[in-house]
Image (cartoon, rainbow, N blue to C red):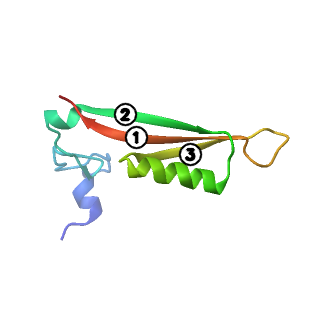
């Protein structure tokens, strides 16, 4: 079994990797993409909540995930003078196939 030094460095320690596979970058295998993988249309839905409570957030999450939307993120708007958020933006995403 070759040592790490023998596999990755030439004599003299130039730091050049030997026998690096062409389908890898930094020892991470590259995925082969087909044309159909490239054309993905992302649709986004933004829901604004002015009354930020756990119940209201739960209601919106349940409503839109039931319709097939996937939660992307929740953003909160907070005023400096308050501890609680004054607004929330719930962002959902949906992948659509390109036609």
Cα separation between marks 3 and 2 = 16 Å
Cα separation between marks 1 and 3 = 12 Å
Kindly identify the residue that appears in the image at 44 percent across and 47 percent down: 64
Image quadrant of residue 41? top left
- In the displayed structure image, the side of residue 50 where residue 95 appears, left or right: left
Where 64 falls versus 54 (above or below)?
above
Q: Give coordinates of residue 93: x percent, y percent.
A: 40, 40
Farthest residue, direction top? 99
Q: Which residue is mark 1?
A: 93
Instruction: Depth check: give the residue in front, 49 or 29.
Output: 49
N-terminal-most mark, 2 or 1: 2
Answer few, some or many: residues within 10 Å of disc 3's Cα (few below 14, many 20 plus, some between 14 and 19). some
Cα separation between marks 2 and 1 = 6 Å
Farthest residue, direction bottom? 1
Kindly identify the residue that appears in the image at 32 percent across and 50 percent down: 13
Image quadrant of residue 49? top right
Where disc 3 sits, the SS reads strand
Where disc 1 sits, the SS reads strand
- In the displayed structure image, the side of residue 73 where residue 55 appears, left or right: right
Q: Which mark is residue 74?
A: 3
Q: Which residue is mark 2?
A: 43
Q: Give coordinates of residue 45: x percent, y percent.
A: 45, 36
Q: Are marks 2 and 1 in contact (CB under 8 Å)?
A: yes
Q: Quadrant of the N terminus?
A: bottom left
Where 36 falls versus 20 (above or below)?
above
């Amino acid at each position: 079994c070759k040592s790490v030094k023998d596999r990755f460095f030439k004599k003299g320690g130039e730091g050049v990797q030997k026998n690096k596979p062409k389908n890898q970058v930094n020892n991470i295998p590259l995925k082969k993409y087909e044309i159909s993988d490239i054309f993905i249309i992302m649709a986004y839905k933004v829901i604004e909540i002015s009354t930020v409570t756990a119940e209201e957030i739960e209601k919106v999450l349940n409503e839109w995930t039931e319709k097939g939307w996937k939660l992307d993120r929740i953003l909160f708007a907070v005023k400096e003078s308050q501890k609680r958020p004054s607004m929330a933006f719930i962002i959902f995403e949906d992948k659509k196939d390109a036609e």
